[in-house]
Amino acid sequence: MSITVSDLRKWKAEHRRFTMLTAYDYTTARWLDQAQIPVILVGDSLGMTMLGYPDTLSVTMEDMIRHGSAVVRGAPGALVVGDLPFMTYHAGLEDAVRNAGRFLQEARVQAVKMEGGGRVIDYTREMTGMGIPVMGHLGLTPTFVNQFGGYRVQGRSDEAAERILSDAQALEAAGAFAVVLEGVPSALGERVTKALTIPTIGIGAGRRCDAQVLVIHDLLGLTTGHVARFVKQYAQIGPAMEAAVRAFDQDVREGAFPTPEHEYSNTAR
Ligand code: KIV
């Protein structure tokens, strides 16, 4: 049995903390599922982590469906959430519903995530009314990078904090089953968490959120370049990978690999 959106609501009522991690491929999803990570987000952060773009804006629905279906095949136990990328729900409700529906039908994710308040609240009401579970995402929403003038903490002024709080409450009223809070002061993270009956999932939103999410490349130490303040690196897989491939390269150049134990003879053994 896989985790469902009802489990997340129940955990909120029980004050049970939980985790969400991103994954973009089958193998990573297998390992996360084996570790019993309950929620896996196929994030549009794959634009940077998998495709090498400078931001998330160039990611397409086709990219998300291809990666999303691989993650679903690797994680039968987790609730897999697909991130609707930029311009897949911006032009209107019809587009939004069609793309969310494609995610469930073609990739077989169990829920979608959308960034922002405003019209997204109406879309959330429509989608949940049609059986498409929605996760909200407020605060430092990465597709707004050009609007924000960079990746800046949001909700620092009273007015901005009130807007994030009221958007979160409106998303809950519209039927969202959880809300990601990204890059906001921890006091605001706590306030929103206390105000909602659905879980908040924080990333740079402080320890009082009901759950925490990290990008898997950040957690594993695979990220090259700047690592944000809110990240904790639990491993250094990038440097370990570099050391392993350097050792392979050296072995081949020096004739130390392959050795007879890695070779086949004419007869079956
Ligand atoms: O795309 C993503 O990875 C995300 C998380 C940072 C929440 O939206």
Image: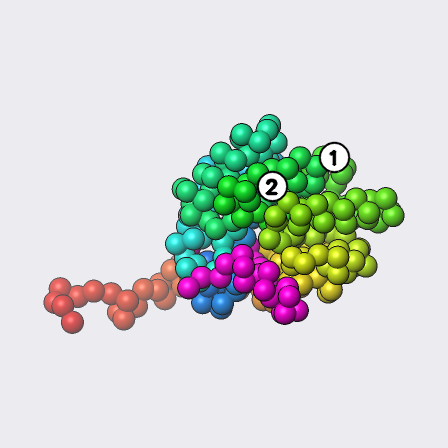
Give the spatial CA distance, label 2 vs label 1. Answer: 25 Å
Of residues 220 and 44, the one nearer the viewer is 44
The mark lying in front, picked from 2 and 1, is 2
* Residue appearing at x 24%, y 65% in the figure: 263
* Residue 33 point in image, percent of width and height: 46, 63
Queried whether the magenta region covers residue 27, the answer comes back as yes
Q: Position of residue 78 (x, y in %)?
A: 48, 60
On screen, residue 13 versus residue 69, left or right, reads right
Drawn side of residue 2 relative to residue 207, left or right: left
Secondary structure under the numbered disc 2 in the rendered image: helix
| Residue 91 percent location from the top left of the image | 60, 28
Above or below, 52 against 188 in this view is above
Nearer-N-terminus badge (2/1)? 2
Residue that carries the numbered disc 2 in the rendered image: 125
Question: Is residue 10 left or right of 186 when viewed as pictured?
Answer: left
Image spot of residue 237 (x, y percent): 54, 63
Tell which residue pokes out farthest to the top in this image.
91
Q: Which residue is mark 1?
A: 147
> Is there any visible trace of residue 63 in the rendered image?
no
Q: Is residue 6 visible?
A: yes
Q: Nearer the viewer, residue 131 or 25?
A: 131
**Which quadrant of the structure image shows residue 201?**
bottom right
Colouring rule applied to residues: rainbow
Amino acid type, residue under disc 1 in the picture: Gln
Q: Which residues are magenta?
A: 1-28
